[in-house]
Image (cartoon, helix red, strand yellow):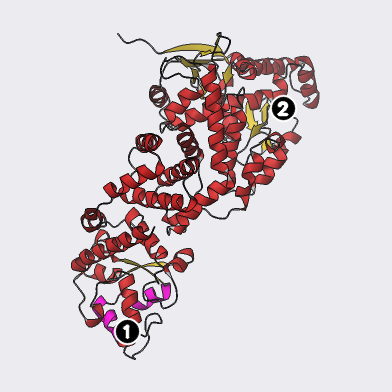
Amino acid sequence: MSTQRYSVTPHPIETLLTWVKSGEIAIPEIQRPFVWEATKVRNLLDSLYQGYPVGYLIAWRNPTVKLKDGSASGGKRILIDGQQRVTALMAALLGIEVLTEDYETVHIRIAFNPQEEKFEVANPAIRKDSAWLPDVAAVFDAKASMFQLVSAYCEANPGSSQDAVFKVLERLRGIVHNHVGVIELAEDLDIETVTEIFIRVNSAGKALSQADFAMSKIAVNETYGGNVLRKAIDYFCHLAVAPEFKAKIEKGDTAFVQSEFFGKMKWICDVNDDIYDPNYTDMLRVAFTSEFGRGKLQDLVALLSGRNFETKAYEDAIAEDSFRKLKNGILAFVNETHFDRITMILRSAGFISSDLISSQNAVNFAYILYLRGRKEHVPPAELEQLVRRWYAMSVLRGRYSGSPESQFDFDIRQIDSRGVKDYVNAVIPNELPDSFWTGMLPQFMDTSSIKSPYFLCYKAAQVKLGDKGFLSRDITVRDLLLNRADVHHVFPRQYLKDKGLTSSSYNQIANYVIAQSEINIAIGAKAPLVYFDELRQQTDGGATRYGGITDQQEMSANLESNCIPAGVLQGAVPDYLGFLEIRRHLMAQKIKSWFAVL
């Protein structure tokens, strides 16, 4: 018979709120935006008033940690499900301010009509209507006099019964005595088990990731500055996509502005580049893996709890050291020079916009590689080349697309034992042998996905190699990708549709070129044999129909740089399937040439 790994205990809401205020139960999201609409808070209060159940809360007690003096600390309970409900109750009943999604501090005021026994979100009209109590928090104020509340209400509402109003308000006050079940999970459960329990109990909720658990562990630890560190992570990610948020931090969180983090991260507000906009999972992965030499975030959760992996015990000294190392990792991540270098490296490889980034985890590990290389004092130019080549290899091989954590863990442990240079120079030839370019890559390019990593690498290759757009005399692929480019079908889409081909057939990436829109429009649905013959005439002194190239040698060079099979100007246009086969090999060789110069 299996051992039950949890307990279920009903507790009055009043007790839960007291625990939260005293820190007995920690709400890790208390410093993050409150995402509920005010109407959901209203509905929650109404459900409690009607005596309806409002679901379970799930708490996971932190492991008991051995302190430096040898004593044991009882771990806090971390509320991992029910945070929004508890925050809503604290906001509505106790008048505690919450942060909105815009990180603005607001009061959520829920009004109550004692005569109709109805809740509503407070608004100007309700505040002017004497039939409503504009904020139920006044009823739950410990200093409030029920006699004065009832008298004031009845005076403002002639004809209302003091006894009736008194009974209704007493019933309202009584909702804090309603019980909510708390599922308390055993402290020795691992993250996977806790996640599985969460999913099964709360199937409608968002699945918790290991990063969520790590962020919870960070947020509830004030002893080693976890609460401020959590803000640094959240704020940096928010500023990366919404620079205007800086003013709100400066106005609403002066304590954080005065911390060591804000001055080191506010530069991100002046960056317009969106090649790398990390979320908190990305930041944790990079900071943890680069600093700890481990790739699995479940290990970070354990280390922040003070776990000694050898003795299986929990020690305060390990927790303290883990928070110190994580802080160092986060500071390295938000360092302006470091962040600028990793985005510069990506751009220098041809990945000049976020549209060309197919794998955030490949970028994450490239950043890890860069940070580790700096620690190993690899010369800057050499380190940049190593990171460029590793990122390109990672994308081409899908290295971090399957089980990124396991691959992160394997790679960083190898780097720990062998060093950055030795490991990178050993892995790349094995991952990209000659057979990859001649056999595997052309096969991989048999796809209709315009977001295919192979097509993205092909476009990066054209950028890096300085190619001109298809049939363009002056406009480069770089220019087109940074402005407005058309993905043009060499064998026009309508031409192939008229022949009965399906979208998966005519949208093959080997049928794509980057072209100016006016060139694309001019070609229209013409058969390739027709418009390639017109191009030949264009270079023989005929009418200039497509682009501005009139020199035959220049035209041939443009077609070659865009991987168009030789001989098309002389009428040797293969059939569509033959064209695709030839062009896949030409595009693969283009990517190989690109990789050689990275």
155 relative to 351, above or below: above
225 relative to 540, above or below: above
Local crowd at mark 2 within 10 Å, few (<14), some, or many (≥20)? Answer: many
Earlier in the chain: of badge 2 and badge 1, it is: 2
Q: Give the range drawn in magenta.
A: 517-536
Q: How many marks?
A: 2
Could you tell me residue 46's position as x and y percent?
58, 25
Residue 552: mark in rendering: 1
1 relative to 194, above or below: above
Could you tell me residue 549's position as x and y percent?
38, 82
Res. 73 image quadrant = top right
Most extreme residue toward the bottom is 541
Is the stretch drawn in magenta largely helix, strand or loop? Answer: helix
Q: Which of 590 and 112 is in front in this view?
A: 590
Residue 530 is a magenta residue:
yes
Residue 235 is a magenta residue:
no
Q: Check disc 1 and give the amino acid type.
A: Gln
Proximity of marks 2 and 1: CB atoms separated by less than 8 Å: no
For the residues labelled 2 and 1, the Cα–Cα distance comes to 84 Å
Residue that label 2 marks: 133
Left/right of residue 264 with respect to residue 179 in the rendered view: right
Residue 167: mark in rendering: none
- Residue at x-position 33% and y-position 90%: 542
